[in-house]
């Protein structure tokens, strides 16, 4: 989308500080729009179950206190 000619003329009238503020405002609006669009889009998640099946083993003494920390348990 092209910037309208009238807007370019208005931009040239602004001093540098006003141009920086306008640019920051435009960036803020664009950020909000992207954030809103991201919220509306369904999240694409891929869940793979049983990835670690058979890879992890819990020992019988899993719940026992760690050596050296008996006083704190």
Image (cartoon, helix red, strand yellow):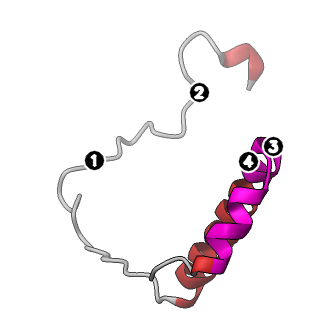
Q: Nearer the viewer, mark 1 or mark 2?
A: 1
Q: Nearer the viewer, mark 2 or mark 3?
A: 3
Q: CA distance from mark 4 to mark 2?
A: 61 Å
- Segment tinted magenta in the rendering: 6-22
Identity of the residue drawn at 73% across and 48% down? 20
Looking at the image, residue 23 lies above or below residue 61: below
| Sooner in the amino-acid sequence: mark 4 or mark 2 | 4
Q: Which residue is mark 1?
A: 57
Is 40 colored magenta in this rendering?
A: no
Lateral position of residue 32 relative to residue 17, left or right: left
Does the rendering let one see residue 22? no
Residue 3 drawn above or below residue 12: below
Say the numbered circle drawn on residue 20.
4
| Mark 2 crowdedness (10 Å alpha carbons): few <14, some 14-19, many ≥20 | few
Viewer-side label of 4, 1: 4
**Which residue is most to the top?**
68
Name which quarter of the figure residue 51 lies in. Answer: bottom left
Considering only order in the chain, which callout, 2 or 1, is on the residue closer to the N terminus? 1
The numbered mark at residue 27 is none
Q: Nearer the viewer, mark 4 or mark 2?
A: 4
Q: Is residue 52 above or below residue 63?
A: below
């Amino acid at each position: 989308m092209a910037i309208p000619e009238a807007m370019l003329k208005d931009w040239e009238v602004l001093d540098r500080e006003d141009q920086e503020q306008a640019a920051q405002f435009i960036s803020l609006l664009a950020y909000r729009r992207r954030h809103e669009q991201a919220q509306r889009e369904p999240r694409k998640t891929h869940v793979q179950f049983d990835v670690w099946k058979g890879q992890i083993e819990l020992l019988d003494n899993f719940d026992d206190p760690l050596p050296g920390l008996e006083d704190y348990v």
